[in-house]
Amino acid sequence: MRTAMKQHLAEHFSELERRVYDLQSPQALTGYPAAMVLMGSSGSGLPGRGERQSVVIRLYAKAGGFAEIDRLGEKLIRLLHEQSFTTEEGSVFRCRYLSEKGSDTRDEALELSVREYRFAADALISEAPTDGADLWLDALALWSEQQLGGAWTGCRGSWPPDYSLPAVLWRVTGCEVKPAGGAAIELRKQLAGHVLGRSEAEEQAAVLALATALGEQGKIPLSAVSKAYMTAEEIRTDLQADPLSHGQLTLTLARRVPRPEVPAALMQQIHYSKAER
């Protein structure tokens, strides 16, 4: 990830004149303005979801002070935010700007102005499409597309290799079966929803829109032909949750189905004897 980001900045950030470095002492920099790319902690890889690597980019300016940092920072965000990169190993990750990190600092000895910018590098673990593998997921993904409209894509189970933003991924996290009378059973599936937007504002708006629609409608069509429905229950949102590792939406879908018939052996004859009672 580091190499891909450094190369992109070196090629497209003309003001830096290719002065893009790994972590080192400011005294070792060959000129200004300059940037350092610092890799932070990473989350564990989760099949069907992905992992997030934190990245901090430190900008150094001399002559223009923090006014120059402001201008350079705006361009840095434009160059990296929501951009996709390919590593030397062929894996793909998407970069997202999060915030400025901490307060501005000033190195009086070197007459340097310094500011850090915090990014996330999201590497999604893609798998082949799973259409038809779970009709409940298919129905929920289609319903989500209809609710959000526009360019939104509903994904099932795992991120497809050709996914594009904005998108929402639904995956099953648990399942239980309960008796519902003598002739029926109730199927209940717990699901998590991962919403990835083109911006944080778009992302949060989509989470709230889906949660509101689920609560208001209460039912999601499983099949338009058979007029079967699933009931949405226990709908919860967490706007602070990581959209990759946890997902911002959780809910339970429930549906009653006829109890499957268990074939029983037919009695061919009955033998009875008083002596054997």
Image: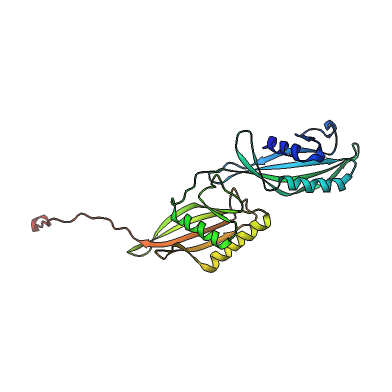
Where residue 276 sits: x, y (%)? 11, 55
Left or right: where 265 falls relative to 21: left
Give the quarter of the figure containing the C terminus.
Answer: bottom left
Residue located at (61% from left, 54% from top): 166
- In the rendered image, residue 122, in percent from the top left (x then y), is placed at 63, 44
For this rendering, which residue is in front, 272 or 27?
A: 27
Q: How many marks?
A: 0
Which of the colour schemes (rainbow, by chain, secondary structure, one colour) is used?
A: rainbow
**155, above or below 210, in the image:** above
Q: Tell which of 79 and 194 is nearer to you.
A: 79
**Which residue lies most toward the bottom here?**
216
Q: Is residue 184 left or right of residue 58?
A: left
Residue drawn at x 58%, y 61% is: 148
* Residue 210 in view (yes/no): no
> Where residue 113 sits: x, y (%)?
86, 42
Left or right of 235 in this view: 65: right
Near-viewer residue (126 or 270): 126
Residue sitting at x 65%, y 53%:
198
Which quadrant of the view contains residue 161?
top right
Q: Quadrant of the N terminus?
A: top right
Residue sitting at x 60%, y 38%: 91
Q: Quadrant of residue 28?
A: top right
Q: Position of residue 88 (x, y in %)?
A: 63, 33
One can see residue 176 in this view: yes
Is residue 2 depicted above or below 238 in this figure? Answer: above
